[in-house]
Image: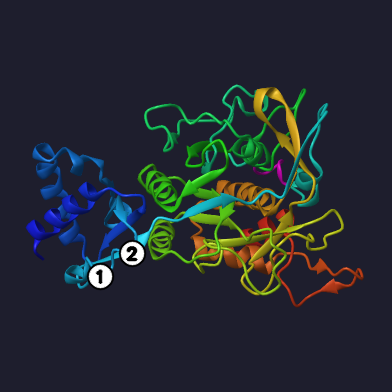
Amino acid sequence: MDVTGFLQLLQSELSSGGPDIRPYLICFHQPDVYEHCREALRYASIEHPRLGAVREEPLVYGFRCMLLAHPEDRWQAFQGDLRLEEDLQISMHAATNKPVNWQRGIPWGVRKIKAPQAWSSTTGHRIHIGVIDTGVDYRHPDLRHSLLSGINLVQRGLPPNDDNGHGTHIAGTIAASNQMYGIIGVAPRSLIHPVKAFDLNGSAFVSDIIAGIDWCVRNKIHIINMSFGMRSRSKSLLQAVTNATNAGISVVASSGNDAKRKSIDYPARYSQTIAVGATDRSRRIASFSNRGSYVDIYAPGEKIVSSWLKNKYHEMSGTSMATSHVSGAIALLLAIKPGLKPQEIKALLKRTANATRSRNNRRSTQTPGEIDIVRLLREAEKS
């Protein structure tokens, strides 16, 4: 590959300016070519400061930078060595949100999946969960014993503090542990690593998600919770998810809230993830939840109470909420069966699920079921 020509074209793109500038990912087909270009870029950026704006994305052997829209023709000479992908925006999967007055106790969803019945044998002790989200409120009393270090990809160098609330809600359902005054999550002794990839408005770029997955892989996280999605397929995001799964990490992703009957959002649609849909108190698929054959498991996702900013509690609905129940359940499982691989965990979840109910209250055996932790752990002990 003509590395000098690559750097010259890249510098020309970065110098062009104009109103139609968009973020792109430049991903190399061969790792050794990427490493060669990365080393050359580091040296070149000393003499050409504009190149310093290019961000490395080692998990997908690529770079993230701003280019003029529709760059494919201009980069045609390098198409055998790399591919270009627009760095799209991605959004949270929460449908409704309202504050509530909460005294103490176990939320209905945690009870529904039978987590309390498992706590005599497992509480998720020492299982590390990366929550790629809006950050977490480190001061919330329900999360005081559940939070470890993380990373802020929105404002790099700062702590991953939550300025939205969504991430704190997700973390509470997974691992809250305030028995006296607050709530208890599915796996109260599991450990949350907040990965802040989403801003105040609950928006992120694909490259931020990839960087978050990369951080989780490097820090040997056991589970990644991804309560977000988009309608477009991303090869770079697929590569990152595949790398995480190959590293032994269970990637749990929400299916989306568009009430689609035969389709779900990415990254949940990738076969490497555990795709989660939402149910209500009656074990019916929630009206807002995407559903169909791409969903692997359902979990409570309607009117879920959990922790919020400034020591408060909010009730939220969405497949985001369902996903956090499943992440907690996997933490309970891994604490007693640490050798299970992601695909084995997915198979166990599907095999031990309870049948969901249709709107006319009939049991549905044709669709994936709702998670049942007691059955999950019992089946795992046999293997």
Pinpoint residue 246: horizontal percent, then vertical percent: 39, 61
Pinpoint residue 212: horizontal percent, then vertical percent: 42, 45
Mark 2 burial class by Cα count in 10 Å: few <14, some 14-19, many 20+: some
- Does the magenta portion include 232? no
Residue type at mark 1 is Asp
Residue 290 falls in image quadrant: bottom right
Question: Observer-nearest residue: 330 or 264?
Answer: 264
- Residue at screen point 36% across, 54% down: 20
Pinpoint residue 256: horizontal percent, then vertical percent: 64, 59
| SS class, disc 2 | loop
Checking the image for residue 104, the label placed there is: none
- Find out whether the residues at labels 1 and 2 contact each other: C-beta distance under 8 Å: yes
Checking the image for residue 73, the label placed there is: 1
Magenta stretch: give its range. Answer: 118-122
**Above or below for 282 versus 164:** below
State the residue position of label 2: 70
Left or right of 179? Residue 6 is left
Mark 1 burial class by Cα count in 10 Å: few <14, some 14-19, many 20+: few
- Residue at screen point 52% across, 53% down: 90
Total tally of numbered discs in the picture: 2
Pinpoint residue 321: horizontal percent, then vertical percent: 69, 48
Colouring style: rainbow
Residue type at mark 2 is His
Whether residue 80 is visible here, answered yes or no, is yes
Whether residue 36 is visible here, answered yes or no, is no
- Residue at screen point 83% across, 28% down: 101
Residue 355 falls in image quadrant: bottom right
**Above or below for 77 versus 229:** below
